[in-house]
Amino acid sequence: MQMINNEKVKKRILRRLASNKFFKWLFIAATGLALLTLAVLLIRIVTQGASSLDWNFMTSFASRRAEDAGIKSAFVGTIWLMVVTAPIAFTLGVGTAIYLEEYAKKGKFTSLIQMNIANLAGVPSIVFGLLGLTIFVRELGLGRSVLAGGLTMSLLILPIIVVASQEAIRAVPGHLREGSFAMGATKWQTIIRIVIPSALPGILTGNILALSRAVGETAPLIMIGALTYIAFLPENLMSQFTVMPIQIFNWTGRPQEAFQAVAAAGIIVLMIMLIIMNSIAVYIRNKFTKRY
Amino acid sequence: MSSKTVREMIEENKSSKTNFRGVTEKVMPKFLLLCAIISVLTTFGIVFTLIFETFNFFSKVSFLEFITSPDWYPMHSNASFGIRPLILGTLTIAAIAILVALPLGLAAAIFLSEYASDRMRRIVKPVLEVLAGVPTIVYGFFALTFVTPLLQNIIPGLSIYNALSPGIVVGVMIIPMIASLSEDAMSAVPNAIREGAYAMGATKFEVAIKVVFPAALSGIIASIVLAISRAIGETMIVTVAGGANPTSAIDITNAIQTMTAYIVQISLGDAGYGTTAYYSIYAVGMTLFVFTLIMNLAAYFISRKFREVY
């Protein structure tokens, strides 16, 4: 009769336990390494850019001399771009989400739209730039304007907004809708008075996060031809403009060492703006989202 | 005092507001449908723009040259348009990126899903996802001014513009994509299966690798495919730190050029409107679009088709 070899079993268990422990620490180390990279990135940029970051930097235009260079036109340009992008993207994105969740019947056409949105989310941003360059700048004759940039960015962030809004609308429980219908409300009244208010925190969070993506994008706007050197502020929708990421890109490409500090200072401004936007989004989500 | 039945009141109410309300009820769905159609039109816009302008390009340059010529010299007097160097540059970056992101991303996913406490996960996961939210121009700056000098200390022959540094940084950028999506897939594996394995005496590591990992494989593969697609489409990091040297000789210590970086280079003003080089960005864009589309569709179907249902 075969007996269990206790020695052997014990050895094997020890080995398995040892590898268990080893891999646990390996996994922790890997996660730690990823987090460490983020920390190094942030610390590095702050130490590089802090010395150039002052009030002058915020209120000066771009300059050929590093010590005079400022981010004013790019900062204002970014705000302009947001103001143009937000309402267009919001209307289209939330509209699409409402249609898909509340009106669309399940079928080929609906799943085509749904798959199309999933795919659009994966299209490289530079391809949106090619689209914007061809359609908005050239075909529609908008030129290298804030409007052309805003329209391009709206299409770029559209899929993010649609998906986020759909999730928010889907989370509104059916009995709220039924209650509204039972009181004699029409479909649109139910949507606009019951569904949207309940889903609004989620929708807003998604929109702000999507907008922060637009604020950080560079490539599509380079395609559109947002200028890299601009010493005036946009005056209307048809004005030429630049944005912070493009200004940073321009500074990064300069051979002079001093411009690296300027670029880092620009990055700090950009990152602070993104952090504020993300914090607002997280705050809205945590504070106002209702759980049913 | 006039008395009315409820029915009469309803009728009266209806007729007084019928016009406005009726119109809204009819118009709004149409307006919303229009919004939804615009997203489809965007796709058509992209596809038709690319096809149309690519067609223009191929009326000047033969398709055969595009796919077989080994050289990409768009600005030469004796121009040559062979896409191969750009594709190789793109794939080099994607390969380096995935070599960095795959082990780190998967390890982070396993840690978050199997080892970390709830509290830990709630803190670490969003922080990790910040990596995906950092603007790519910031990564580009980081690659050029930090990673490249650091690597130059280790590899003396490394040129300022090279494939290695942006490749690594693109890898860092896509870590959260693999980590987060794989973690979602692994968390979705029901606990009963884990407990079954524990009951058989398996260690935590064995449960993670031999039970949870295979069960979540479709989601994990989909996340990897999406991450590769993202690496292929990444633009600013490779533009800033990768250089502008389309070459078929794969040498990660030297400058390369990716498809995306080429498009940026041309649109920064190296080629005038209407020149062959100008149209070439559409042909390159088309190639890029096809690459990413195939990968995105693959990820979409992998996660649908091979999903284990419990």
Image (tube, coloured by chain):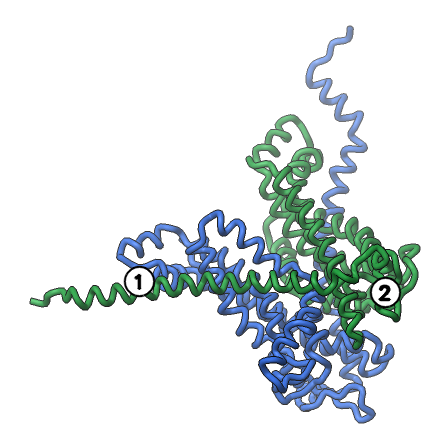
Give the mark, 2 or 1, whose residue is nearer the N terminus: 1
Per the rendering, the mark at residue A69 is: 2
* SS at mark 2 in the image: loop
Residue A130 visible? The answer is no
Residue A180 % position (x, y): 64, 30
Chain letter for the residue marked with disc 1 in the picture: A
Q: Quadrant of the C terminus of chain A?
A: top right
Residue A227 % position (x, y): 86, 67
Residue A87 % position (x, y): 79, 49
- What colour has chain B? blue
Residue at 71% across, 49% down: A276
Q: Is residue B148 above or below residue B124?
A: below
Q: Is residue B268 left or right of residue B128?
A: right
Q: Which residue is mark 1?
A: A17
Front residue of this view, candidates A281 and A199? A281
Front residue of this view, candidates B101 and B73? B101
Q: Quadrant of residue B142?
A: bottom right
Q: Residues within 10 Å of mark 1 (few under 14, many from 20)?
A: some
- Farthest top residue? B1
Q: Quadrant of the N terminus of chain A?
A: bottom left
Q: Quadrant of residue A249?
A: bottom right
Q: Is residue A27 above or below residue B60?
A: above
The chain painted green is A
